[in-house]
Image: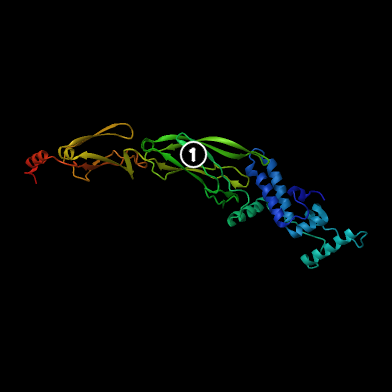
Amino acid sequence: MGVDYYNILKVNRNASEDDLKKAYKRLAMIWHPDKNPINKSEAEAKFKRISEAYDVLSDPQKRQIYDLYGEEALKSGQIPPPQPSSSSSASSSSRVHHHHFYNRQHHHHNPTSFRFNPRDAEDIYAEIFGSESNGGAGGGGSGGAGVRGFGKDGFFRGANGSDFGGTPSSSSSGLRKVAPLESVLPCSLEELYKGSKKKMRISRNVYVTTGKFRTLEEILTVEIKPGWKKGTKITFPEKGNQEPGIIPADVVFVVDEKPHALYKRDGNDLVVNQEITLLEALTGKTIDLTTLDGRNLVIPLTDIVKPGAEVVVPNEGMPISKEAGRKGNLRVKFDVKYPSRLTAEQKSDLKRVLGGTS
């Protein structure tokens, strides 16, 4: 019979259409040339054999000719004519099968010839995996699951596939692209002010060969630019788990701002709340602040400060990431603390001092 298509797909001769599809998917994911850059030529040859076997066995007409007459007859298109007599029940059975098949398929026209049109291996692959991903079927795993690692600020964890969602989508190559794996990247306000580099260690499964995987640890350097805001995304393409038949997920870090003890961010501005006494509000005060990059900032208060007042210091806010050299404003909001009680003498003094004012 020549090539044994059943053996190539590792199925028995009674394999159903579903059995064939499952066998094809399992083997095609392992031997697709894109998944075997090191031994690409060997993988390409095996991938084509797997595709040819599926092409023949999944087509009832091709499969029946192959079962009855073998690979050579199938590819040459020359079907041996039925024998006039049979010495065994087996050959008689085959002959009846042959006439029934060709009477149905060819309407009695030239039952001894057949045109074999092999399908392209990539077309078969795209059809099987493309239809599966569009329908949301489950074969082949979620991909990218279990990406995790440690950052210098603590534990960086990428959740498993279900936590990240990750319904695969079709790509132009026919391979499924797994949804990005997003993980929060907490940053201090100082890091977002000055910029910084964070080293993130990830651990992922990498496909080696013949269905084997190994765990690879990798350091990703995330470069935080001055002025980046909460929600900024940094993408590392295809750093998720490798699995046959899919394009690995992108690993995406999403910037988050840690709360700061003194400053609060408002867009490109920095806001600081400052409590002063009633006396300071009336007579003046010097505010000393330490900026996010460690400078000492002196803000003199010479005017009377009313409750809820705000002093604006230009260009001392957050850097504007898209406008080099520019910063937002620093806004100092004041809360005037009134005395809880006054003595009779204090009241008298205040009346004398303030009585003439309006």
Q: Residues within 10 Å of mark 1 (few under 14, many from 20)?
A: many
Image position, residue 21 (x, y; %): 69, 54
Image position, residue 50 (x, y; %): 71, 48
Furthest residue toward bottom? 107
Can residue 276 be seen?
Answer: yes
- The residue labelled by disc 1 is 156
Can residue 118 be seen?
Answer: no
Name the residue rendered at 66%, 53% in the picture: 124
Vertical comparison of 291 with 59: above or below: above
Name the residue rendered at 77%, 51% in the picture: 6
**Left or right relative to 192: residue 173:** right
Q: Secondary structure at mark 1?
A: strand
Front one among 239 and 357: 357
Front one among 163 and 108: 163
Amino acid on which the number 1 mark rests in the picture: Phe
The colour style of the image is rainbow
Image position, residue 183 (x, y; %): 48, 43
The image quadrant that residue 79 belongs to is bottom right
The image quadrant that residue 44 belongs to is top right
**Left or right relative to 245: residue 185:** left
